Image (cartoon, rainbow, N blue to C red):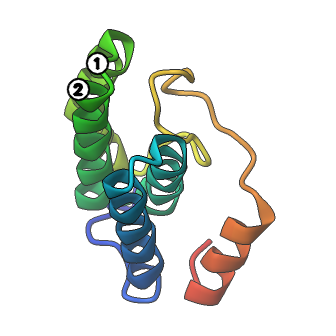
Amino acid sequence: MKFFTSIPNGLKPYFDVELEEYRTAYSKGKLATAWSHLERAHIIGQQYPYAHSYVHWKMLQFGFKIKSVKEVLGQIPRLVFGGVKSFVGKVPIGNPGGANVPPLKPFPIDQELKDIFARAGVK
C-alpha cells in the first residue's frame, strides 16, 4: 500500500494558483467563481492529506460565509475523514468535494486538469 503525504513539487504551484484565484474571486464577491476554484484545488490536492484537508477547511468556511447549513454539515465529515482517506490512497478521483455531490463518488476529470497532472508528472 502506498501512503501519500505532501503534494508533489510539480503539482503544488497549480494547487496554489487555484487557491489564489479562489481568494481573489471571493474578495470580489464572485462566489460561484470562487467556489469553482476551490473545487479545482480539491481535485488537484485530494490525493495529499494536508492539501485535501486544507481545501475542505476552506469549503467549510465558505459554507459559513454563504450561510449554507447543507455545506457546513457536509464539510464536517469530509474535513475529518478526507485527509485520512488521502493518506491511505483511497479517494474518489475527480470528486469536486462539495456537499452537493456524494463524498465517495469518483467524477471524470476535465482535460485542463488532466493536462496539469501530466505536466506535473502525476498520474
Q: Is residue 77 left or right of residue 25?
A: left
Q: Is residue 35 above or below residue 72?
A: below
- Separation of marks 1 and 2 at Cα, in angstroms: 5 Å
Residue 66 image-quadrant placement: top left
- The secondary element bearing badge 1 is classed as loop
Query: What residue is shown at x 59% (from left), y 86% (from top)?
Result: 121
Q: Residues within 10 Å of mark 1 (few under 14, many from 20)?
A: few
Q: Are marks 1 and 2 in contact (CB under 8 Å)?
A: yes
Horizontal side of residue 56 vs 11, given as left or right: left
Residue 57 lies in what quarter of the image? top left
Q: Is residue 108 left or right of residue 15?
A: right
Residue in front for this viewpoint, 38 or 47: 38
- Number of numbered tags placed on the structure image: 2
Residue at (23, 23) in percent of width and height: 76
Q: If the image is split into quadrants, where does the C terminus sit?
A: bottom right
Residue 54 left/right relative to 112: left
Identify the amino acid type marked 1.
Lys
Residue 117 disc label: none
With respect to residue 48, does 96 lie above or below? above
Q: Split into 4 quadrants, where in the image is the N terminus?
A: bottom left
- Counting from the top left corner in percent of width and height, residue 28 is at 38, 56
Residue for badge 2: 64
Instruction: Tell which residue pokes out farthest to the right in this image.
Output: 111
Q: Position of residue 114 (x, y in %)?
A: 71, 69
Q: Amino acid at mark 2?
A: Phe
Q: Secondary structure at mark 2?
A: helix
- In front: 42, or 72? 72
Residue at 53 percent across and 41 percent down: it is 32
Percent of width and height locating residue 71: 36, 21
Q: Where residue 98 appears, x then y in whole percent?
A: 46, 31
User: How would you rate the neighbour count of disc 2 (Cα within 10 Å): few for under 14, some for 14-19, many for 20 or more?
Assistant: some
Q: Dot 1 corresponds to which residue?
A: 67
